[in-house]
Amino acid sequence: MQRWRGLDAAPSGWRRSVVTIGVFDGVHRGHQAIVGEAVARARAAGVPSVVLTFDPHPSEVVRPGSHPSVLTSPRYKAELVEGLGADVLCVLEFTQEFSRLTPAEFAHLALVEHLHATAVVVGENFRFGHKAAGNVAELARIGDRFGFAAAGVPLVRDGDTTISSTYVRGCVDAGDVTAAARALGREHRVEGVVVRGDARGRTLGYPTANLRTAPHAAVPADGVYAAWLVRGGERLPAAVSVGTNPTFEGRERRVEAYVLDFDGDLYGAEVALDFVASLRAADTMTFDSVDALVAQIGQDVTNTRALLLP
């Protein structure tokens, strides 16, 4: 898959393509349906498929300070999009100037002038242009004018629930990583670099990898989780604590992973945590004694082992 930064990265001589547009944060099941439809149409037409996305998140530009938590890092989003078969991922810088383009101006600039779209595939609730004035019907009218077809893909539902990035964020914020995984079609992932903490876990007999996560990363609610720690091609079972270590009057919110049966050094490593299940919630994080805490950690490890290594 080609990865472009900006529309000007399109190579000279670029011809026709099928384009899909969106932030695609999470690349959840709904996004997968949209990208999948674009890829299928492109292959049928014998042209490349282009996934057009934005950075930074449009809401941060339109309403500064409102940046939502981020479900997928740019790198992981690209990996997921590539796995769906897209030929090109084009990341477009979202600026104040760009946000003021009318629907027709955006379509002409991106879809006609640079990407030469023969078809544009979006979700049925797609909005675009200044003040989100454009919708699928408007996109179709513009397409009639400029020579591309427009298709709105139905939203994906799980029972009465519509799958969306907002819904997934809500699940993660509530610590319901199981529901988040159903909506995503895979476990929710948090990435980070392992940094040195206060080494208290080692003194308790459970040394942990302390993750420094990216700003705005969608970290699950305080609690303890069973997860896979991913390092390169390895997937290692881990019991993960998210919170402030209230037993020791901690104030800094941390993500700490105890990797089962691991005796190596992770300091400085770029790793990811794929959250599988919640083991206990934030209201069970404080203990009257260190011995009680150690006993509970032992039970967390046992429960993690049972879930991940049955």
Image: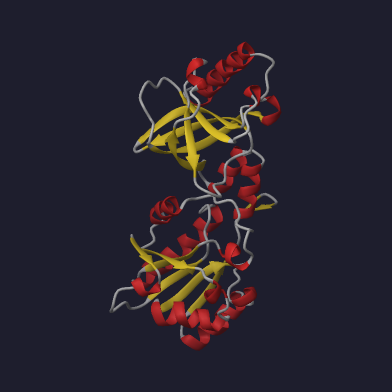
> Is residue 119 toward the left or the right of residue 217 in the image?
left
* 194 or 87, nearer to the observer: 194
Position of 222 compared to 19: left or right?
Answer: right
Relative to residue 168, is residue 237 depicted above or below? above
Residue 293 image position (x, y, % from top left): 62, 17
- Picture quadrant of residue 103: bottom right
**Residue 160 picture location, percent across and down:** 70, 51
4 shown above or below 249: below
Q: Residue furthest bottom?
A: 145
Q: Quadrant of residue 164?
A: bottom right
Residue 21 visible: yes
- The x, y position of residue 60, in whole percent, is 59, 62
- Identified at 45% across, 77% down, the residue is 110
Does 22 appear above or below 261? below
Q: Position of residue 297 (x, y in %)?
A: 57, 19
Q: Nearer the viewer, residue 81 or 272?
A: 272
Along the viewing direction, whichever of 243 and 7 lies nearer the viewer: 243
